Image: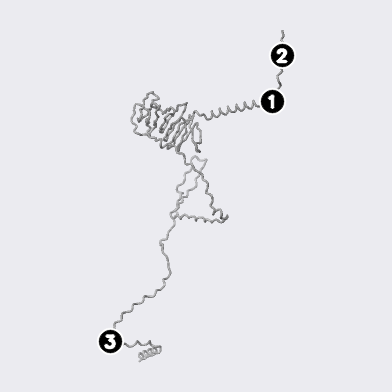
Amino acid sequence: MFREFGYVQLPSIPLRVMRRAAWLLTSVTVLAATAVLTTRTVRSDEPVTDSVGTIDGAAVAVTGPLRMEVVRGFPRTVLRSGSDVLVKSGTARLDLTEGGTISICGPAHFSVLKSGNLLTFALDTGTIHLSIEHGPAVTIYTPLLQIQPIAIGDGPQDTLVGFDSTGAMCVRAYRGAVRLEQQLTSQNIVVPQSSDVLLLNGQLDGLRGGGDRCTCDPQLTKYLPPPRLELSAPPPPSEEAQARPLGSGTTIAALPLEKPAPKDGPIYQFNVPPLIYNANAEVQPEVDMSKITVVRRVRVRPTLIFQGRVEGELPLSSPPAAAPAPTSPRPAGSPPKPAAQAKDSVMDRMVHFVRKLWTRGS
């Protein structure tokens, strides 16, 4: 009834070795779980599949999901599915991830969605110019129309869609065709290549020629990175500068500051009474305009203004010597004139004076 089984004795494993093996297995499991969780977190935070492209512009505001990248030392904004873009003024450029560019001429407002290889733009205002060679399939929605560029064979797609200043919509097919479909009535038409149409109130019945009313040149929206500053090392000092002792440099005096010229014009000063606010009053008292004074300050000029300079007395100059009169030749028979008498002496004058008195008395 009963069978006897033989027991095989297994080799004994030391307890220390078992503990090390268990610790090693636990560490490997924790590291693997951490790597898996980190990968899932990165993928959930920054999914690669929903990146639309990088946008550049002078006055661009982006709301919703986006990502910032640094390309060649400059920050770039990466649009993701669900981004809402507002171009306040000027132009902007969107470089698609799958290839192709979209030029935006503001003011413009649109939002973008991405699903696989399909791009959907909801255009509210502004003008966009699509240039796609081998990129995603693009569909543009306006409040009343659905617009879809169509490539001819494997050719590129070059389409312009926008609104002019009057609110009319312009559609221009540079390369490839464009399909227009009315969202309410499902009426659709195809705009052939090199055609330009204008739609009023979103109705396909009243198509007319656009006449180049909407323009958005891709060359004007081309992104130009700002100039990068390069730091250069200063030149090494010359031997003469190194041999000069410290403190022997010349001192450069500061330039004198030019004082502003005083203003000669009048100065006006307004004196306004303080404002009064009463929290208990329903109507606040108005400012009394009769108490506002205007003071005009002017600089009075004198009626007589002397301009010139005062100099000292000039030194007396001797009168010019008169030229000697030419002497006429004296005739041979005339006698010479007597010499002039000498000046009267003091005694002769007194004698002459007494004679005059004597003559008057007699």
Tell me how far mark 3 sits from mark 2, CA to CA.
199 Å
Quarter of the figure with residue 39: top right
In the image, residue 285 sits, relative to residue 267, either above or below, namely: above
Q: Which residue does the numbered mark 3 point to in the structure image?
A: 332
Residue 240 vs residue 128: left or right?
right
Picture residue at 41% right of the left edge, 72% below the top: 315
Residue 6 badge: 2
Q: Which residue does the numbered mark 1 point to in the structure image?
A: 17
Could you classify mark 3 by the number of other residues whose Cα lies within 10 Å: few (under 14), some (14-19), or many (20 or more)? few
Picture residue at 46% right of the left edge, 39% below the top: 225
* In the image, farthest residue toward the top: 1
Q: Nearer the viewer, residue 219 or 165?
A: 219
Give x and y (percent) for residue 84: 47, 32
Dots 3 and 1: beta carbons under 8 Å? Answer: no
Q: Amino acid at mark 1?
A: Val
- Which of marks 2 and 3 precedes in the sequence? 2
